[in-house]
Amino acid sequence: MTFGGERVRTQFNPSKMSLVDRIKQDTAHLIDTCNQNTLAPPEEQRLWAIAMTKYEEACMWAVKAATWVPSKPDPAVKEYPPDHPVPGDLGSVSL
């Protein structure tokens, strides 16, 4: 497994979703590309490290979005028709 594959855990996909596999593989490739610059000067290494961390974070959020399952609506929350002013919304009440 490559460095990028380890960073985003390409083998871990309990959802078995092909979209998750694609997100992780593409992100692993980007991280591997950044990791090729390990002999750069210190400041450049820092910038590459930040880029790899941000790719890893973006992968996490993308996987969360891809596997998102909305929770059940809260029964305490009332749904109002679109033309009904929301309580406390003074902008929708004519004065």
Image (cartoon, grey):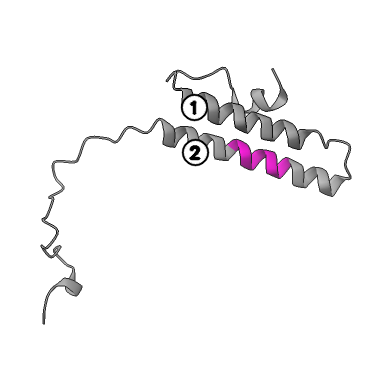
Mark 1: amino acid: Val
Residue at x 89% of width, y 37% of height: 39
Task: Say what amino acid the circle numbered 2 marks.
Answer: Trp
Rendering coords of residue 88 (x, y %): 16, 67
| Label 2 secondary element | helix
Left or right side of 31 for 76: left
Q: Identify the image quadrant of the C terminus.
A: bottom left
Label 1: few (<14), some (14–19) or many (≥20) C-alpha neighbours in 10 Å: many
Judging by the rendered image, the residue that carries numbered circle 1 is 20
**Dominant SS type (magenta):** helix
State how far apart marks 1 and 2 are (Cα): 11 Å
The disc, 1 or 2, on the residue closer to the chain's N-terminal end is: 1
**Number of other residues with Cα within 10 Å of mark 2, as a class: few under 14, some 14 to 19, many 20 or more:** few
- Residue 18 lies left or right of residue 41; in this view the side is left
Query: Which residues make up the magenta segment?
Result: 49-56
Figure quadrant of the N terminus? top right
Q: Residue at x 88, y 41 (%)?
A: 40
**Above/below status of 34 relative to 4:** below
